[in-house]
Amino acid sequence: MAHYMKVKRRRRRCLGCKQLFVADPRNHYHQRWCSEPGCQHARQQAKQRQWRSRPENRDYFWGAAHVDRVKTWRQKHPGYWKRPPKSAKGTLQELCPSQPSEEQKVNPSLVVGALQEVLSTQHPMIVGLISMLTASTLQEDIVATGRRLIAKGQEILGMVPRTPLNHNEQNTPGSGALAPAPAPV
């Protein structure tokens, strides 16, 4: 076994929460803070205080040059601070109706799963086969064809609800009737 694989990583005490932690192996030589959000926030504040305390940075945001820079930026971006957040624009939700609609009964036979649920439960080979047979990669086409294939398979196997399987019928499978049940082995 190579030497580099045997290196034991030392645990360090976080400068923020004072708890022991294992430093990330990519920067273990200078990591002094753990990855907890509170410690990361404290680390950022400490670094900013350290940066502002240096003599060359004390007046970094002060002076006529910076005032002019901010004024020109604000002229180019009017109303920037007054804009609504981007997530509020263009929501896909519809407003709720003010009057409740009549209660409707749902036909259980018409309830089908979402496209993603139907596709995710299928084996990738089956999904690929259906897409090749239909010459389409659209989820709607694949799911519709898959549902038809499942219904046909259930019909052939006698698994369709409210369609009892009569094992006494001796019709041939090609005649459109149910195939006889296989003999037990």
Image: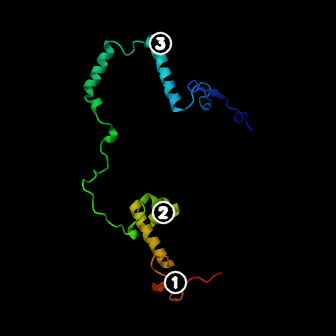
In front: 179, or 32? 32
Disc with the residue nearer the chain's start (3 vs 2): 3
Vertical order, 158 against 27 (above or below): below
Left or right? Give the position of 153 relative to 185.
Answer: left
The answer to which image quadrant residue 99 occupies is bottom left
Q: Amino acid at mark 3?
A: Arg
Number of other residues with Cα within 10 Å of mark 2, as a class: few under 14, some 14 to 19, many 20 or more:
many
The answer to which image quadrant residue 3 occupies is top right
In front: 138, or 169? 169
Number of other residues with Cα within 10 Å of mark 1, as a class: few under 14, some 14 to 19, many 20 or more:
some
Left or right? Give the position of 60 relative to 70.
Answer: right
| Residue at position x 47%, y 12% in the image | 54
The residue singled out by tag 3 in the image is 54
Position of the C terminus, as image quadrant, is bottom right
Number of other residues with Cα within 10 Å of mark 3, as a class: few under 14, some 14 to 19, many 20 or more:
few
Alpha-carbon span between mark 3 and mark 2: 63 Å
From the top left corner, tell me how far across and down residue 141 is, in percent: 39, 64
Numbered circle sitting on residue 127: 2
Disc with the residue nearer the chain's start (3 vs 1): 3
Whether the residues at callouts 1 and 2 have beta carbons within 8 Å, the answer is: no
From the top left corner, tell me how far across and down residue 143 is, in percent: 42, 64
Numbered circle sitting on residue 179: 1
| Residue at position x 42%, y 12% in the image | 58
